[in-house]
Each structure stands twice: as C-alpha cells, then as structure tokens.
Amino acid sequence: MTKAKTGIVMMNLGGPANLDQVEPFLLELFADREIIQLPLQRWLGPFIARRRTPKVKRLYQSIGGGSPILGYTEAQGRGMVERLDRLSPATAPHRFYVAFRYVPPKSEDALRAMHADGVKRAVAFTQYPQFSCSTTGSSLNELWRAAARTGLRDAFEWSVIDRWPVHDGFIAAMTDTVREGLEQFDPADRDRAVILFSAHSLPLDVIDRGDSYPQEVGAGVQRVVERLGAPNPYLLAYQSDVGPVRWLGPSTEQVIRRLGARGEKRVLVVPIAFTSDHIETLSELDREYGEVAHRAGISHYKRAPALNDRPRFLDALADIVREHLASGLPYSSQYRERCAGCSNPQCRNILNPIVTAAQQAGDGQERLTVGR
Amino acid sequence: MTKAKTGIVMMNLGGPANLDQVEPFLLELFADREIIQLPLQRWLGPFIARRRTPKVKRLYQSIGGGSPILGYTEAQGRGMVERLDRLSPATAPHRFYVAFRYVPPKSEDALRAMHADGVKRAVAFTQYPQFSCSTTGSSLNELWRAAARTGLRDAFEWSVIDRWPVHDGFIAAMTDTVREGLEQFDPADRDRAVILFSAHSLPLDVIDRGDSYPQEVGAGVQRVVERLGAPNPYLLAYQSDVGPVRWLGPSTEQVIRRLGARGEKRVLVVPIAFTSDHIETLSELDREYGEVAHRAGISHYKRAPALNDRPRFLDALADIVREHLASGLPYSSQYRERCAGCSNPQCRNILNPIVTAAQQAGDGQERLTVGR
C-alpha cells in the first residue's frame, strides 16, 4: 500500500451504529459542555442520557436498528479521495479518516490510523456545511485534545476546513435534491408546494454569544433558491429543540402544523444543515413531522433526499478539499475569531498549522499564533 | 409638465423632520399593532410614546434637530427616476412619491399626489432591502388601507417590489461602503479590523411566526463579504431592542462590549438593513455604541457610511425597478406566502394587481387572487 501523503479527517457528530451504542452515545453527548451546558452536569447529564435511552433506542429500532451515518461517511470519503487523487496529483495519495464526536470511530481512532499510514499533512474537514461552535467547534476542540491524549501532538501539520455554507458544488448538489423533492408532486400543482428548509436548531444562548450558524444557513438557503429558479414560496425553520431553554425559531414542527392549519396541502421539507440521512431526517422529519403534517391536513408532505452518496455531492467534497489545499491557507478568515461571548479558551485553536507562503516570506505570522 | 406614466411609491418608516414631529411620530409608532403588540394598546401605546418623547427629542436634537431621512429619500427618488427614464423609456416618464409610515408624507399624500399626476401604473417599492412583516409588511398594509380611505381604491394598477436583499447593485453599493469604512483604518492593521454588520433587531415572537428577515439579512451579509474579498473576520448582530420581551440576538451593543473586553482594538460597524442615515446610525451606532466601544477599550471604532445618495446606490434603485417592470410580475414569489404563524388577514395583499402575460393567456390566475 502506498504511503498516504494527505490525510483528511472527516469530522461529524456520528450516531449509534447499533442499539447497544445508544446509551454510550447519549452519555457522551450529554457530557459535552461545548454543546449542552447543564447545572450539575456530571450528575444530571448521565441522568438525562439514561432516562432518554429507551425512547431513543425505539427510534433507532424504527429506522433499521442504527444510524446509517458511518456507512454514508465512508462512501463520501471513498468518493472524495478517489476524485482528489485525480484532481490534485501533487497532494496524492489522499486517504480519509472518520472522526465522530460521540461514537466510534472517534478522534483518537482517526489520529492513530493516520499516523500508522505515515501521514504528515492532515486536513481537519468538518462535515457540517455551516459553522457552529456546538458542532464543528466541539469536534475541533476534541480533535486537538485527542492529539494530546494519544501523544500525537506533533505528528501532523494541520489545516482546517471549518465551513463551506455556500460552496458552489454544495449548493448545486443541494439544489438537485430540492428539484428531486419537487418531482414527487404532481406537475400540475408542483409550483404551489411550500419549500420548508429545516436546519437543526440551537439554544438562544449560543446564538446570543455570536455563533455564525444562522447567518450561514440563511445564506445557503438564498443560494439554493436562486439556483433552483422555481416560483415556489420557501421558508427556513429550525428543528429538534429539546429541554426547557428557548431555542432559535421558527420551529419546523410548529411551522408544519400552522401551514396545515391555514390550508396548505403541499409541503416539501429540505434538510439544509445535514449531509447524510440520520435520525433527524429518517425519524424526525419523515415519521414524526410526517404524522404532524398528516394530522394538520397537509395531504402531500414530502422530503427532499439527503445528499448521502450522490455523485454530485462527492464532487463537491473533493472540490472543497482541492480548493483548500490549493489555497495554502490554514483555515478560513472566520475560524480564529472566537464568538464575542465566548468563555472557552480552547475554542478556535489549531495544532501545528501548516506554514503558509506569507509566513515563509516573514509576513502575517501573528494571525496564526495559537491562543491569540 | 408631462403626465407621469409610472408612479413609484417609496415606502419607509420615516422619522421626525423636526422636534415637533417627535411626539406624533412616537404616538403613531406605538399605535401600530403590526410592529408592536401591547396589552391595552390604546392606553399603553400613548403612555409609552409620551414618556419617551423628551428623551427621543434630545436624541434628534443631538443629530441636528431632525431625521435626514426625507432629504435622502427625495435624493434617492430623483436619482432613481432620472436613471429610469433613460433605462426604461417604454415606462417613462417615471415619478416618485414618498410614503412614510409614521410621519408625513404618508401613504395618503403619496396616493393623492400620484392621482393628481395622472398616474395609472403604480409600483409600491419598499426601501427596506430585507422583508419583514413589521416593516415592509406594515407599510404595504397601510398603503392599501390608505387607498380605501382616500377613495383611490380603483385609481391605480399595482405591482410590488417587496424585497431586494441580494440584488447585485445593492450588494455592490454596500460593499463600497464597507471598503470605505475599512479605509478609515491604518493600512498596516486594516486587515485585523472586525467587520460587525448590524441590522435592526426584531422581537423573537416575530421571528417565531416565520418572518424571513434574519434569513435575508444573513444572505446579504454573505454576499457583501464575498464581494469584498478581504481577510477580515466578520459577524452579524442586531441592534435597537427595547422593552421587556426577548429580541433576536446577538445584541450589537453587547457584542461591541465583549469584543472590547477580549482585547479587540479595531471594529468597523456596518448598517446592513438601513439605506439612509437616521437616528439608529447617527445617534445609536455613532454616539451611543461609540461610547460603549470607547469604554470597552476599542481604540479604533469606525462606521461604514450609509448608502444615502451615493451614485452607485441610485444606480441600484433604478436597476431594481427596471428589472421589476421588465419582469411583468406583480410581486416576488415570496410575497403572497403569509408567515406560518400569521394571524393578520390584511397581510400580503395587493390592490388591483397588474395583469400578467400568464394571466392574459388564461394561466396562473389563481395565485393572484387577493386574500388567497
């Protein structure tokens, strides 16, 4: 096997691959203070996780006994590196490594495998198109901590793809899914279907800190709609809020109920912030909200397919990495700017960033210093 | 004087032209249930308006004794129709009419003047780039009510320009203002200035109804930053929240305080949702938040200029109307779709819409029916 020259760490939340992983997944999720902050978290986190386990197990049971996210991520990774080897021979061979946040394979697994493959140049590639501290931020903080825990702190030179909310290839692939979604309606009244973009919500406290997520989601929606060029009305809502705190709205579930109440008969829901099918699409959007829609009198409730392993999306992933490698930049100009209300000194760091052309010329070093 | 062929009603909030107009302006503002919903509004609205009058008078006194918005709107109108007469001879001559929501000239004034000029074809052109029910929505509802009150219900054939959040000319003009704003910083550290886009906030209850405002603001910010192509970090915050209810964040004022607290020295604030200088730029952004910035240790706090009567913005306004007239469409595909949580049957209507080519061909009529 040829030694890999460029390692690409595909970071995502992950989901339990089988029912036995549900409880450990929830325990890790509710222990992560970068996503959820609870009083007495060491006690309350496990309590909530254990209490939710039976219900969440039933949900995973209903979608086939586990999350399909690992399978899709691996298909995406294979498609991506195969394309990259052609598109960017100078950085080939490329190899991908999956780093989930709350289930295996985790950051440690990715780092150890990458080290075993002889990789020196590593790219941390978030699989969340829009940046949020609670998703990409948490994954990156964990990646650097895992590097320290595994003794691989100095093993790689890093750069980060921290967001791609309006990347042309992503928007093109998303627009394809919307078009396919619309094709599920009768041509005679297809143009009347309301396109309901749905993104995972965030607690308002995260928004008020200055998280850029809603701005980036809004920008992506606009781009998809423009590219689609269809006369359908559209709107953006946020799904999956839980617990007692107030989350960013409008709530997807409530919007569906209200659209039905005022007589809409055709709704196409479009997951805009997830790239693979998982519990929030297969169970929440399809079943739970499908039932809400049915009860509200929406006779034609459809969902646009997820990007999953669609060739055009694999093209997009490869193109995002190719552009990033060609830029020579260690991260986007947004990455180092912590949220205005951030109180986590671990945020927005990078280990051993690549040396940029500007730095080699003795310029712009300071912006790259870790822990600015 | 040649009879006007196309009348363009420029709708905006308006502001008191002199100190005597402050109290009536506030009385009208706090009586508008489409922007503010208070318990016992007929009593509490005037109470709050009268109590705020002395403070607001002092603010207007400090910016020269009144709002400059009428002067700028008239300059925008003149530049727009002059360009339109060249760009769109088939619909010339064009004439503009200002319709402010809470101070003269109001909708009645615009409608009567337009009627006196012999206009038959009228365009209701919002001067808010991003749509919100509390701004453009309220202005349009009032325009149709004023037409009924003045007996001019059947006087005009209408079309509506209800939003233009990412129109190329608008984005180009906005990007110019950001560039000029950045030029106020020393070239040596200009790239480190944080660009803080600031839009007027909305109560979360409006957001939760499904108002499209934050999505459209987010899209515009992305477009400006892309066109700017500068390495500066940026963020979007919301200003001017008042009263006890929770508003959409992050709060511009709090973000400025926090950026200062963590050691930022250079901040450029950019008004993204207003087109003319007014109390929220000249007093709130420049003075009030300028003072906050100073106290927080931000040594270089600057504001990008408002669009006002910049020629490139006048080009944009003319181009928006030209495109709209050429499209033959009565409104955007978003306009007729009421918010999912809307309870106001007046919303999203239009009087005597123009007959479109599709309708003349006997197609698509139903979508144009008022009160769908």
Image (cartoon, coloured by chain):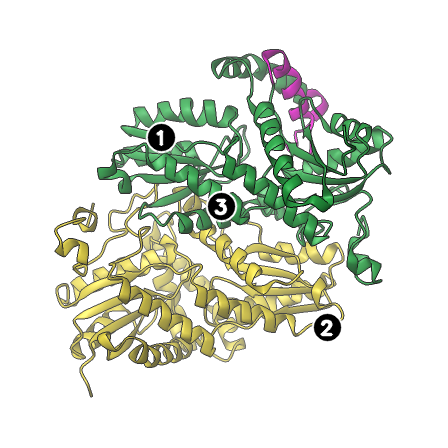
Chain colours: A green, B yellow
> Which residue in the protein does label 3 denote?
A171
Disc 1 and disc 2: Cα gap in Å? 53 Å
* Label 3 – label 1 distance at C-alpha: 20 Å
How many C-alpha atoms fall within 10 Å of the one at disc 1: few (<14), some, or many (≥20)? Answer: many
**For the point 31% across and 51% down, which residue is it?**
B333
Instruction: Indicate the quadrant containing the C terminus of chain B: top left, top right, bottom left or bottom right.
Output: top left
Q: Is residue A272 left or right of residue A369?
A: left
Pointer 2 residue: B187
Identified by mark 1, the residue type is Lys
Mark 3 and mark 2: Cα distance apart in space: 35 Å
* Residue drawn at (50%, 80%) of the image: B64
Quarter of the image with the N terminus of chain B in it: bottom left
Kind of residue at badge 3:
Ile
Q: For the residue labelled by badge 2, is the local secondary structure a helix, a strand or a loop?
A: loop
Start-end of magenta stretch: A17-43
Residue at 58% over, 70% down: B304
Q: Can residue B23 be seen in this view?
A: yes
Q: What amino acid is labelled 2 in the image?
A: Pro
Disc marking residue A302: 1
Q: With respect to residue B21, does A255 lie above or below?
A: above
Q: Mark 1 lies on which chain?
A: A
Same-chain check, marks 1 and 2: no
| In front: label 3 or label 2 | 3
Pick the residue in front: B201 or B20: B201
Dot 1: element? strand
